[in-house]
Image (tube, rainbow, N blue to C red):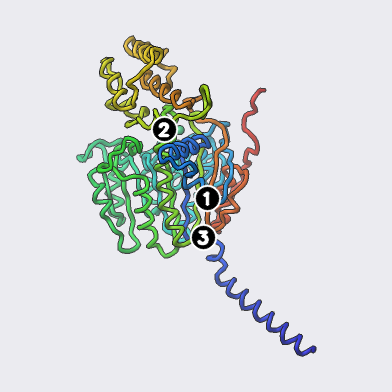
Amino acid sequence: MLRKFFSRKLAVIALALFLGLIGGVNSASAHAPRYVFYFIGDGMGAAQRQAAEYYLRAETGVKDIKLRMNQFPVAGINTTYSADSLVTDSAAAGTALAAGYKTNNGIIAQLPDGTNVKSLVEAAEEKGMGTGLVTTTRITHATPAVFASHNSNRDAENEIALDYLDSGVDFFAGGGYRHFVPQNWDGGKSKRKDDLNIAEKFKGQGYHIFLTEKDTQKFRNYKPSGQEKVFAAFTYSHLPYELDRENDHTPSLAELTAKGIEVLEKYKEGFFLMVEGGRIDHACHAHDPAGSIHDTLAFDKALDEAYSFYQKYPDETLIVVVADHETGGFGLGFGDNYFLKMDQLFKAKVTTADVLNEGVGKYDKDRKKFFDFIATNLGLDNLSLDEKIKIEQAMDLIDGSQKDAIATYAGYDPAAITVTHIMSERANMFWTTYAHSGTTVPLSAIGVGAEALGGFKDNTEVARTLFSILEFKPTEVAFTHPTSLPKVINY
Ligand SMILES: [Zn+2]
């Protein structure tokens, strides 16, 4: 009996030791995901997600269809305030999401005192993983910048471009070549004040370069054969809004993401890929509901690419979807019956944010031309008397160059804003600010370690949780995080 007990006990111990050994050998790979996607919707609050989903339902007629991001099993809510304001900007919120530290608005991956803080991308580089930054904005814009540069000023994009050279990031794709080509560049305009050809320096480091719209097809045809590096900037400034994008000119966010995956999956130590839907924010600053919806849907299509990859490697992949802040104070469901009416938005063939504010649809004192343009391109061929009067009043302001009155439109074209407000009103949508708002934003996640990201968290906790899941070492500096709102509001 005793002998039998011992032999059974020994067998159990031996098995436990064996399993322990396997567990020990594999502990890093068993816990830390090999492939990580960090999707950041700039300005993508709860209302932006909801508007896009309802639009998709109305468009497809499928009543219960959901955005990909709304199908993930883990959900969270995140506070976004910065170290110096309830309303953050993308630099401070990005620093929090990338490095786990609060900082002041305008600062890129530094504390307010100038100390650099390590980003998740930099930590991934330390571990030898492949890394990528993909965006629809200029690649030097605040959200990508916080992952691969450090600067006290988000507007120092020429310096940020220079930082990228030493970042080790393996895949860059977005817009804004203007900071990577020398002044007097013969390929077009530049914003640089020096003769540095940063794109050429990337080439010298072995990167495959795709510059200007002309390289779109070349980019689409490109196939990496081993651990290769890519630098792609297709436009002078931001990539176009999805609604204005011409397929033969520039790739979609989904295409950039798919190519990023194709390149980075060749990296033996896994990868960390940040994908930003950067212009949801811009559309919402300009109160353009159709612009916001189409860019959110394009972001969700990019997420589909990551999700397909996840389906191939579910035990090794983590996908996280966050937002840096909400923009526009976007409200849904106004008017008589509180429902959204998407019909008017279906008729939008162009953005008001870009095309009406500064593109071919801009009011140039030819009233008939403007009314014809919005009839053809926005479906506004049946203006009520009240709507027409509002647009004409905005035209009067522009014709009279009444600067003070125009300033109330936050620098936007009064006629464009009046038209976009008519579009919004017809859809029962409303805007409360031309800036960002201080509301919380949703998070979604799926894959290895995702559960830890759920719940109500501050944006710094999201990054810190990711550092922990990925077994990365974050920056350890003494810095007191504001644990509550930095400025108490007088009630
Ligand atoms: Zn913004």
Vertically, is 230 above or below 185? below
Q: Specify whether 11 is left or right of 404.
A: right
- Given the image, on which type of amino acid does mark 1 rest? Phe
Tag 1–tag 2 contact (CB < 8 Å): no
Tag 3–tag 1 contact (CB < 8 Å): no
Cα distance between the residues tagged 1 and 2:
26 Å
Please identify, in this view, whether the residue under mark 1 or under mark 2 is nearer the observer.
Answer: 1
Please identify, in this view, whether the residue under mark 3 or under mark 1 is nearer the observer.
Answer: 1
Q: Report whether residue 87 is seen.
A: yes
Vertically, is 204 above or below 423? below
Task: Using a 10 Å C-alpha cutoff, classify the residue at mark 1 as few (fewer than 14 neighbours), some (14 to 19) or many (20 or more).
Answer: some
- Kindly identify which residue carries mark 1: 72
Which of the two discs, 3 and 1, labels the residue nearer the N terminus? 3
- Kindly identify which residue carries mark 3: 33
For ligand 1, tell me if the residue under mark 2 lies within 8 Å.
yes
Which of the two discs, 1 and 2, labels the residue nearer the N terminus? 1
Residue 185 picture quarter: top left
Q: Residue 282 carries which label?
A: 2
Vertically, is 37 above or below 43? below
Which quadrant of the figure shows ligand 1? top left
Task: Using a 10 Å C-alpha cutoff, classify the residue at mark 3 as few (fewer than 14 neighbours), some (14 to 19) or many (20 or more).
Answer: many
Tag 3–tag 2 contact (CB < 8 Å): no
User: Residue at position x 27%, y 37% from top?
Assistant: 190
Tell me the SS state at disc 1.
Answer: loop
Cα distance between the residues tagged 3 and 1:
17 Å
Between 377 and 138, the one lying in front of the other is: 377
Vertically, is 155 above or below 4? above
